[in-house]
Amino acid sequence: MDRTYDEKLADFEARVGRGEKIEPGDWMPEEYRKNLIRMMSQHAHSEIVGQLPEGKWIPYAPGFRRKLTLVAKVQDEAGHGQLLYRAAETLGKSREDMMEELLSGKAKYANVFNYPTPTWADVGVIGWLVDTAAVINQTMLAQSSYGPYARAMKRICYEESFHIKQGYDIIAALARGTPEQRKMAQDSIDRWWYPTLMMSGPPDSLSVHSQQALKWRIKTKSNEQVRQEFVDHIVPQIRALGFEVADKDCSYDKTSGHYRYTQPDWEELKRVINGDGPCNKERLDARRKTHEDGRWVREALAVKGRKSAEAA
Ligand code: COA
């Protein structure tokens, strides 16, 4: 006899509750599928657009070793995007549709990548601060109930952890440098502080999707928990290098065992993720141009694929 929706839902929730992974062919509530597609495609777009602010610095990287590492890092981000599009495709959404949503401006991607990178220190700060925030979030997502997402996260976290070292190494070198180099690093830390705090998402009271995502273990920690973990982890590191935290009120609270910090401007997050950040236009224009430039490759591959299928 066919099981009712409620029976299937109870079975699904019991599996999630036991910590089992949900796999592509398994029954899942439509809202679970939609929430995952939304989050995973936004995540994939973030990896792809995230290549741009740092990629700009490849020709100007100071020295051969820095250039090689930066090229490898930017390539890693492209690979992460591919892994995540592939994982999202397992939920029935085509890559073409996801790409169309990005290029038309309908889809969101991480707020941070809409800010400019005017100095070399920004490359270091993206690797160190932004990727630390990303890894803390992604380590949590590696426990996600959806198998393909959780597995993609494990691989991505290994590589992102290396990116953090690359970023830290750049900033540590600037910290040992001239007063001008130290100032360049401090200015960059200041500029990226609030955008990086925003990266973990709005406060729990303003978050639209968290409640459902937590219930079905798409996410295993709330936006605020992830942000607090980031602050607790990074503030001592910033100070250990002799730099200051942009938030002058940021202080350690002995009672809670956490750093208190000033909330970012949540209206700014809304503006930036809805298309009105300092570099949104530049980022999307660059993606659209790359997509057009690569059209002949996609078309050639499609013809080759058709011919191989006919010959088989
Ligand atoms: N950048 C861009 N968009 C953001 C954002 C950010 N930092 N924080 C929140 N948003 C968007 C959400 O995507 C959502 O938009 P939508 O309803 O149009 O899809 C909206 O703001 C409300 O946020 P919320 O309800 O809290 O969304 P959420 O439960 O998906 O949490 C994230 C937001 C970013 C924490 C979550 O999506 C996530 O962990 N994503 C995967 C990690 C990722 O994308 N990292 C990118 C850097 S590599």
Image: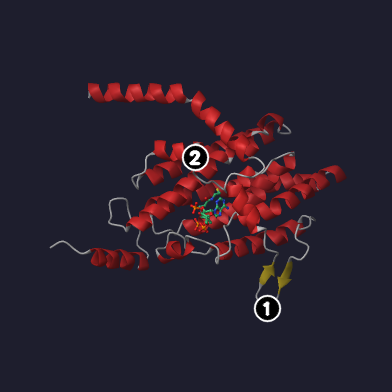
Instruction: Specify whether tag 2 is near ligand 1 (CB below 8 Å).
Output: no
The residue indicated by pointer 2 is: 102
User: Which residue is found at the position 35% from the left and 62% from the top?
Assistant: 20
Q: Quadrant of the C terminus?
A: top left
Going by the picture, which residue comes out furthest to the left? Answer: 1
| Mark 1 and mark 2: Cα distance apart in space | 44 Å
- Is 268 displayed left or right of 27 in the figure? right
* Quarter occupied by residue 306: top left
Instruction: Decide: is 304 above or below 115.
Output: above
Q: Position of residue 187 (x, y in %)?
A: 78, 48
Q: Position of residue 130 (x, y in %)?
A: 63, 50
Q: Position of residue 256 (x, y in %)?
A: 65, 75
Q: Can residue 205 be seen in this snapshot?
A: yes
Q: Can residue 196 be seen in this snapshot?
A: no
Mark 2 or mark 1, which is nearer the start of the sequence? 2
Label disc, if present, on residue 255 of the rendered structure: 1
Label disc, if present, on residue 263 of the rendered structure: none
Between disc 1 and disc 2, the foreground one is 2
Label 1: element kind:
loop
Camera-side residue of 80 and 90 = 90
Disc 1 residue type (three-letter): Thr
Disc 2 residue type (three-letter): Leu
User: Which residue is found at the position 78% from the left and 57% from the top?
Assistant: 244
